[in-house]
Amino acid sequence: KFTEKFIRIFPFCEKIIMNKKARTKLMLRLGLMINVVYAVYNLLTGVLYGSVWFGAVAIYYLMLCAVKFFLLFRGFDPKGSRRRALKDMRISGIMLTLLNLTISILIYQMIVTDSVHLYGRSVIAMAAGYTVFRIVAVVTDWIGSKGNFDPIFFTVKGLSFSVALMSLFSLQTS
């Protein structure tokens, strides 16, 4: 089997391949790093183009980083009970609600100012690439984990779905 051959060649990858929790933590960390870079990118693009939109998107991604940071350092407690996991899920839900409030402010700002966003091709190409990446990642993650309702894993999947939708919405305004 391919997995067994891969582990024989790269034994240090066994924990990530075989342990769902380790794999989720790794992906959450990588996602956190990507979101920090994307937040900084949006902030710099907002300053460069004088765009309130990109500044607000940067704030959204910084808030998203806070949720992921919370999940990484609170949600994966090996001694934690299911009750605590459900509490962490509720706290993450409140944080996601704040993220949705940020999106609502973005939509309101877009409608009130009736602004059209004209950006360079490179900006739109980077946004499109990121959006495609997020949508593919979310779809493959949901397909690969049918029937699992661990509160923390479910929260991470919901968070990923929210990010994919925000990326799609952001791309539509470019």
Image (cartoon, grey):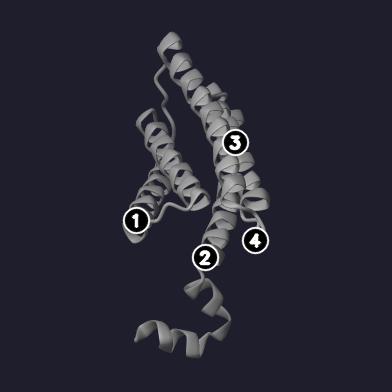
**Closer to us: 78 or 83:** 83
Identity of the residue drawn at 40% across and 13% down: 111
Name which of mark 2 and mark 1 comes first in the sequence.
2
Q: Position of residue 55 (x, y in %)?
A: 58, 28
Q: Can you tell which quarter of the image residue 15 is in? A: bottom right
Q: Is residue 154 above or below residue 5?
A: above
Identity of the residue drawn at 41% across and 43% down: 161
| Residue type indicated by callout 3 | Ile
Element carrying mark 2: helix
**Closer to us: 105 or 117:** 105
Judging by the rendered image, the residue that carries numbered circle 1 is: 147
- Report, in whole angstroms, how far the alpha carbon at label 4 lies from the one at label 3: 18 Å
Name which of mark 4 and mark 3 comes first in the sequence.
4
Name which of mark 3 and mark 1 comes first in the sequence.
3
| Residue type indicated by callout 4 | Pro
| Residue type indicated by callout 2 | Arg
Of the two numbered discs 2 and 3 in the rendering, the one whose residue sits closer to the viewer: 3
Q: Can you tell which quarter of the image residue 107 is in? A: top left
Identity of the residue drawn at 47% across and 20% down: 104
Q: Position of residue 6 (x, y in %)?
A: 44, 85
**Closer to us: 2 or 134:** 2
- Report, in whole angstroms, how far the alpha carbon at label 4 lies from the one at label 1: 22 Å
Left or right position of 41 against 166: right
Name which of mark 2 and mark 4 comes first in the sequence.
2
Judging by the rendered image, the residue that carries numbered circle 2 is: 23
Judging by the rendered image, the residue that carries numbered circle 3 is: 91
Q: Which mark is residue 78?
A: 4
